[in-house]
Image (cartoon, rainbow, N blue to C red):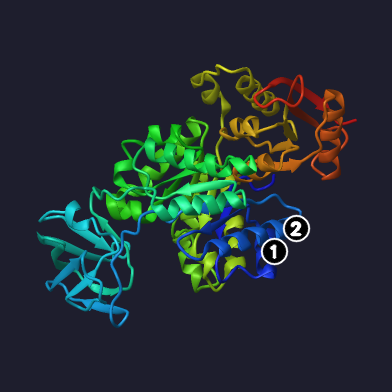
Amino acid sequence: MPRATKIVATLGPASSAPEVLERLLRAGVDVVRLNFSHGTAQDHIDRANLVRAVADRVGKPIALMADLQGPKIRVGKFAEGKVMLVPGAPFILDAARTEPGNVEIVGLDYKELPRDVRPGDALLLNDGLLVLTVEAVRGDQVHTLVKIGGELSNNKGINKQGGGLTAPALTAKDMEDIKTAMAFQADYVAVSFPKNATDMEMARQLANVAGEPYRHKPAMIAKIERSEAIPQLEAILRASDGIMVARGDLAVEVGNATVPALQKRMIRMAREMDKIAITATQMMESMIVNPVPTRAEVSDVANAVLDGTDAVMLSAETAAGKYPVETVEQMAAIAHEAERAEEFGLKDDFMQRHFGRIDQSIAMGALFTAHHLGCKAIIALTESGSTALWMSRHNIKVPIFGLTHKHIAERRMALYRNVQPILMPTHNDRDQALAEAEQVLVERGVLKPGDTYAITCGEPMGYPGGTNMLKVCRVA
């Protein structure tokens, strides 16, 4: 069995050299994340072109994910780059301040903070390592007392415990970055800090308009990192193609102890709604500086795999870490071992689901048949990748191969759990297409004489959403 869980790796200074990137792809990376919080538009275009060139050389479909920065909810800069905050000391956050800060006061990138807080609120800085208690709001100044102190450096993030910051999900910079992402036809666009379905609908509309000259529509990923997003999760999922369990900012807002159960709930809901789930943040954090992960990190990655996540994501580990390739190798090995221990049973899936579409019913029929006949593979001849996506929402110990003639569908399927995308020339003749699909998997060593496999396609060929045929074959 090939590894089912996909790996998302962030590109950065440690991984932008062509030879390192090639090693990363060969080690198991399926999706490359471009972090729009750093770099210029041209930087991202150049890196996207590099990824596509290296992927072609490796002969592997790689999806590109453009991750938008979102609102800058951060403190400003300090005269000496950082200060040490002492518990019990007063500290002022000043939205009007333009000069560098000191141990008593600092400016804000987020100018709306004085309007969003009131006395008694807790503000968490630098991913919750520092905690300030709001004492008073005076004009543009938020006067606080340091509850938990420590080092505070330039441009560290601010969260309000329990949520409630009014910053919009899409900034003017994000809107320009969407245009940049469409210039290189990013396969996925990840939206930071959405609070509701409207944020995702607006992002999709902007992306579709920006992508129109290229005839490109990206898939949209909602990064769940605000407490306000949790009650709106189902609506956000309906407006998106998938979610990212962004555990950093989310944990700061809702509390660390709440996140593991939320992670399981979000992944389960995404799978039930035929959406994608990505688990992110600090998965292999220690490997930024160490050549091996901690036992807790190994368990964390394995647990996400057992939860049913489509992908596990690496951030600084591959962007700036000392061991980017080794990190991917370790993550791939952990995922593979966890998958071997997975329990699966299609009975509950079939008894509790209702299929209102022919193509969905065919996809489910392929899973059921392949499971009971012990098929070596399931092949989905697909225009858009939807049939392969529906199949991938269910645990089954049979690899799924999504065969398509469209590059966008091939790359998009690179993120689907247990789906191996393959580019194949288009055919209008059904029998010729079925024969060539079998030949492709025989040549790759997936199938050999005597093996059975299930294959789905649509008649007539070449229409998205037209899957209406399931055939069980034996290799001669």
Q: Position of residue 311 (x, y in %)?
A: 54, 48
Q: Quadrant for the C terminus, please.
A: top right
Q: Residue at x 54, y 44 (%)?
A: 210
Check the image and report above or below for 316 versus 100. above
Task: Mark yes or no: residue 293 visible.
Answer: no
Left or right: 56 with respect to 251?
right
Task: Mark yes or no: residue 174 visible.
Answer: yes
The kind of residue on which mark 1 rests is Glu
The kind of residue on which mark 2 rests is Val
Crowdedness near tag 2: few (<14), some (14–19) or many (≥20) residues, C-alpha within 10 Å: some
Q: How many marks?
A: 2
Q: Quadrant of residue 467?
A: top right
Q: Which mark is residue 180?
A: none
Q: Position of residue 46 (x, y in %)?
A: 63, 63
The reply to whether discs 2 and 1 touch (Cβ–Cβ < 8 Å) is yes
Q: Nearer the viewer, residue 454 or 230?
A: 230
Check the image and report above or below for 48 versus 207. below
Q: Position of residue 356 (x, y in %)?
A: 55, 16
Q: Residue at x 46, y 54 (%)?
A: 300
Q: Which mark is residue 58?
A: 2
Q: CA distance from mark 2 to mark 1?
A: 7 Å
Left or right: 367 with respect to 241?
right
Q: Nearer the viewer, residue 216 or 416?
A: 216
Q: Residue at x 74, y 25 (%)?
A: 457
Residue furthest out toward the bottom? 80
- SS under mark 1: helix
- SS under mark 2: helix
Mark 2 and mark 1 lie on one chain; the one further toward the N terminus is 1
Crowdedness near tag 1: few (<14), some (14–19) or many (≥20) residues, C-alpha within 10 Å: many
Q: Which residue is mark 1?
A: 22
Left or right: 174 with respect to 349?
left
Check the image and report above or below for 332 versus 420. below
